[in-house]
Amino acid sequence: MCEPSDTLLEYNVLEGIHSWMRARRAHLHLHFSRAWRSITWIGSVLTIASDGLPGAMQGEIIMFLITVMLMMMGTGAILPSERWQGSFNVFCILAWSAMRARP
């Protein structure tokens, strides 16, 4: 049978963990709300890169073009800022040019 002091100790430990998790979640939410555009931009760039490498190795230029075009149009809805959208479009054009320049 549990002693009352054991139960109180367990409750205090669990309460401490719960309050730490709440504070951490609030901190992450605050960080994400500030940096969501850069996180989205990086995720989009990684999507293009992850499709570009296999496409370059196998010579699938058309599939890469489709991916680039869809990502360029799709990020227009996700990245409403002209600066973020413009830089992503420049990256896509450079990636497409690198794919075309490959012998």
Image (spheres, rainbow, N blue to C red):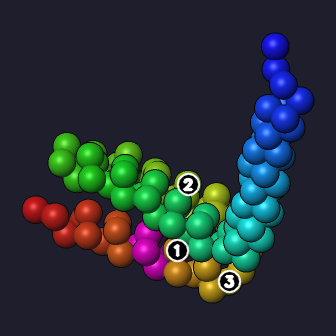
Look at 79% across and 32% down and name the residue there: 6
Q: Secondary structure at mark 1?
A: helix
Frontmost residue, 51 versus 25:
25
Q: Position of residue 25 (x, y in %)?
A: 76, 57
In terms of sequence position, does the residue under pointer 1 or pointer 2 come before the other? Answer: 2
**Residue 3 as seen in the image, left or right of residue 83:** right
Residue 26 has which mark? none
Please, what is the three-letter code of the amino acid marked with disc 3?
Glu
Return the residue nearer the eye: 23 or 82: 23
Measure the alpha-carbon separation of dots 2 and 3.
18 Å
Element under label 3?
helix
Identify which residue is drawn at 76% across, 44% down: 13
Question: Label 2 belongs to which residue?
Answer: 70
> Which is in the foreground here, disc 1 or disc 2?
1
Residue receiving disc 3: 82
Which residue is painted at 26% across and 63% down in the image? Answer: 99
Residue 39 % position (x, y): 59, 67
Q: Position of residue 51 (x, y in %)?
A: 37, 50
In this view, 39 is above or below 83: above
Give amino acid for label 2.
Leu
Q: Which residue is at 52% across, 81% downward?
A: 87
Q: Which residue is mark 1?
A: 88
Q: Which contiguous range is marked in magenta?
A: 89-93
Q: CA distance from mark 3 to mark 1?
A: 10 Å
